[in-house]
Amino acid sequence: MNIGQLKLSDFGRGLVIFVFSAVLTALLQMLNNGFGAIDYKSLLLIAATSGISYLLKNFFTDKESGKFLGRV
């Protein structure tokens, strides 16, 4: 079990999720509110939450079996 460890590749993938979340959130805000009406504070909050969630999921996932907390 390798629960509680993160690799450098996990941070790279977390960054990719951060960027994708930011782009998709910006597109959704533009579609709902018109072009140019982007709330950058909420955009960064959603993107950061997504990236951190991915890192936490990997931190608590067993690297050998791929199970969360070694069980699920």
Image (cartoon, rainbow, N blue to C red):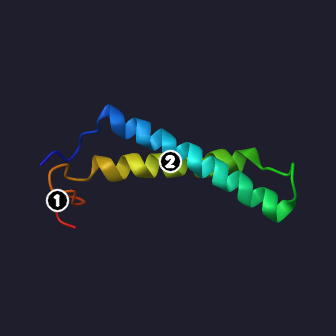
In the image, taking residue 70 as reference, residue 20 lies left or right, namely right
Q: Position of residue 14 (x, y in %)?
A: 44, 43
The residue lying at 19 percent from left, 52 percent from top is 62
Residue lying farthest to the left in this orientation: 1
Q: Quadrant of residue 2?
A: top left
Q: Nearer the viewer, residue 1 or 27?
A: 27
Q: Is residue 27 above or below residue 12?
A: below
Inspect the image, locate mark 2, and give the three-letter code of the amino acid beneath it: Ile
Secondary structure of residue under mark 2: helix
Residue lying farthest to the top in this orientation: 8
Q: Quadrant of the C terminus?
A: bottom left
Residue highlighted by disc 2: 17
In the image, taking residue 12 as reference, residue 35 lies left or right, namely right
Residue highlighted by disc 1: 70
In the image, taking residue 13 as reference, residue 63 lies left or right, namely left
Please rate how many residues cluster around mark 2, counting C-alpha atoms within 10 Å: few if below 14, some from 14 to 19, many from 20: many
Q: Nearer the viewer, residue 48 or 29?
A: 29
Q: Please name which of the two marks, 1 or 2, marks the residue nearer to the observer.
A: 2
Question: How far apart are labels 1 and 2 at the CA level?
Answer: 24 Å
> Are the residues tagged 1 and 2 within 8 Å (C-beta)?
no
Residue lying farthest to the bottom in this orientation: 72
Query: What label does residue 45 carry, if any?
Result: none
Secondary structure of residue under mark 1: loop
Looking at marks 1 and 2 on the same chain, the residue that comes earlier in the sequence is marked by 2
In the image, taking residue 45 as reference, residue 40 lies left or right, namely right
Q: Position of residue 7 (x, y in %)?
A: 29, 35
Q: Nearer the viewer, residue 24 or 47?
A: 24
Q: Is residue 72 above or below residue 41?
A: below
Please rate how many residues cluster around mark 1, counting C-alpha atoms within 10 Å: few if below 14, some from 14 to 19, many from 20: some
